[in-house]
Amino acid sequence: MARHEREARYGRFTGGPDPLAPPLDLSEALDAVSEGVMAGYSPEQSMREFLRRGGRGQAGLDELAGRVQRRRRELLERHHLGGTLEEVAALLERALTAERGQLARDTRMDPMDRTLREMTIDTLPASPAAAVGELSDYDWASPEARDAYRRIQDLLGAEALDARFAGMKQALENATDADRAAVSEMLTDLTELLGKHSRGEDTPEDFRRFMDAHADAFPERPENIDELIDALAARAAAAQRMMRSMTPEQREELMALSRQAFGSPELMEQLGRLDGLLQTLRPGEDWDGSAEFEGDQGLGVSEGAAAMAELGHLDALAEQLAQGSAGSPLSELDLDAVARHLGGDAAVSLRTLARLEESMRESGYLSRRPDGDLRLSPAALRRLGGALLRDAARRLSGRTGSRDTRMSGAAGEQTGSSREWRFGDVESWDVPRTISNAISRVAADGGDPGSGIRLLPDDIEVRETEARTQAAVALLVDTSFSMAMEGRWVPMKRTALALHHLVGTRFRQDRLQLISFGRVAQTRTMEELLSLDPRYEMGTNLHHALLLAGRFFRRHPSMQPVLLVVTDGEPTAHLLGSGDPWFGYPPAPETLRATVDELDRVAGFGTQTTFFRLGHDPGLGRFLDALARRVGGTVVAPDVDDLGAAVVGRFLHARRGRPQSGDPWSAGGRWAV
């Protein structure tokens, strides 16, 4: 049989997403978003905060913005804009030194001529610009001096052109008169083209003819006149900002020198007309900005214009990063600009952040409501709830005197027999019967069990348990402002979500009601509680919360009622007969009496009650102790970080219907009062 081999070809990587990059891990981002949501922020705000801050080994938008500012500061602190003036001064000094030497050596020169020449160069103004101007008609005796002076004129012209046309300075090195004439012709044609465009008289053919004649002056290779104008206006605006950034003395000196560019003022006049047209066509460019350069490294005119252009790009990049922090999609940011100004690693970081943002939106962990707001999806709630429940179980297992909490076996007491597994069952597998079923199935199908078997759902049997009384669980959580002020807001929400996940996955026959109570009480869905913001309002209305819990228990008369109350303050509000809340501090007798009466009614259902006391308020401690003795309940005073484990532990033990020896939540346990 002929063997066919596929030929592989390799080439240089040409950009785009890294094909060897590891898959994105969304767990850290999801955890950050979830924590933000529980702290009262929206998922959108929480995701923005994560992208702004970054993750483990991942630069965030803040760090990238910091690099932008450091690069900007480096440009300003390292350079100044007098480079061209310094170079002109050095060339002028070289020319004058060479001329004096030539005059001293030339014995054949007429003495009167020599004297006049020496007087001319010895009485030059101190200003290089004025000196260059006075020497415009001077007949140099020294070829070296003449060459240096000509270099001054060429330098000024090349710098002025290079500030507006990329690469022009290098193109005009050792320029001939023909080269200068070609530049002048290009400027004339360009001014004419832009003038026609400003009047609406140009055609695409005009642009094509211009580019055919002068394409070498435009390495950007614009494809139409708008791209040409954009490139020219950006550079012209940078050159103008550079001039505005000079000191008044530098600016005056440079403008005077520029009139000597290529030995005549014609070039600067042409550039002035061109700049005026560009400013009319692109008024949105920054033509009036400036910056303060403070360094000791001089920049020439073209280099200064390039530095100003880079500063403009950095400012635009900083604004884009700020918009990304505020909510604009990161995919819209200019990765090429990031790589150009901050380096390739910064572009990789930004691309990764953009992928994280996109993946979070497409992962199913965030869902968009009809009003446009993002919310944690049910999948995200399940994932987060599972993580919180595992953390609670770990804390339970690690407590002194406690036992390992095996929540997976909490569905009932085993009878010794087994049955087929059904979807939703939480009982332990009967492993020998399950394996035996799989072996029998494989053998019946003619397979060889010795070569390995694969379990199918129909093979699974679980250990049968006796039915257990269903529970109606009311979790009452204090949402008064003190909970947020004392750092208990997020632990409260984590606790509720852990219990919600436990009931929803391991005790599906039970019912859980979440009730928040501040100035008034309210039943909440898990999503509503997670997105609840702290609000500054006076009142801890446990009376209203107990009233809602009683209504919940009455709706489930066949279930065992379990009451779990999380609070950090004594009751300071109760409902009046009109249904309006009444507040008083310190706690008024009427409020305490209404709260106790409502607790008695709830206890009348045979409710197993646990109070979770947060903080160290002795008044609250005495009050909750009295309530617990009154209804045969328990008071638990966990650290705030252990609140989730405490609530889950008490629920499990109430669910079993009896405390266990060594239980840290039972009377005499570590956290029981």
Image (tube, helix red, strand yellow):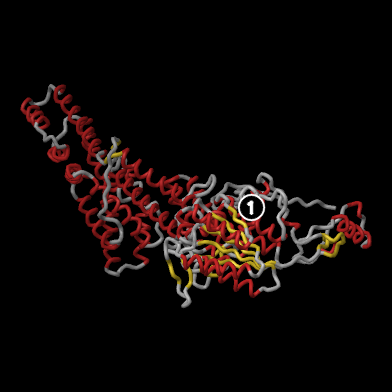
Q: Relative to residue 177, is residue 565 depicted above or below?
A: below
Q: Position of residue 109 (x, y in %)?
A: 11, 26
Taking the image as drawn, is residue 358 in sight? yes
Q: Quadrant of residue 120?
A: top left
Q: Position of residue 457 (x, y in %)?
A: 81, 63
75 displayed left or right of 486: left
Count of numbered tags: 1
281 displayed left or right of 577: left
21 displayed left or right of 215: right
Q: Residue furthest bottom?
A: 578
Q: Position of residue 283 (x, y in %)?
A: 28, 61
Q: Residue at x 24, y 43 (%)?
A: 156
Q: Relative to residue 601, is residue 646 depicted above or below?
A: above
Q: Secondary structure at mark 1?
A: helix
- Residue 450 vs residue 217, the one in the foreground: 450
Q: Residue at x 39, y 58 (%)?
A: 222
- Residue 618 vs residue 612, the one in the foreground: 618
Q: Residue at x 54, y 64 (%)?
A: 529
Q: Residue furthest left?
A: 112
Q: Relative to residue 441, is residue 235 depicted above or below?
A: above
- Residue 60 vs residue 672, the one in the foreground: 672
489 displayed left or right of 72: right
Q: Quadrant of residue 475?
A: bottom right
Taking the image as drawn, is residue 367 in sight? no
Q: Residue at x 67, y 67 (%)?
A: 606
Write down the residue under mark 1: 392
- Mark 1 Cα shell of 10 Å, populated few (<14), some (14-19), many (≥20): many
Q: Position of residue 375 (x, y in %)?
A: 54, 65
Identity, as a three-letter code, of the amino acid under mark 1: Ala
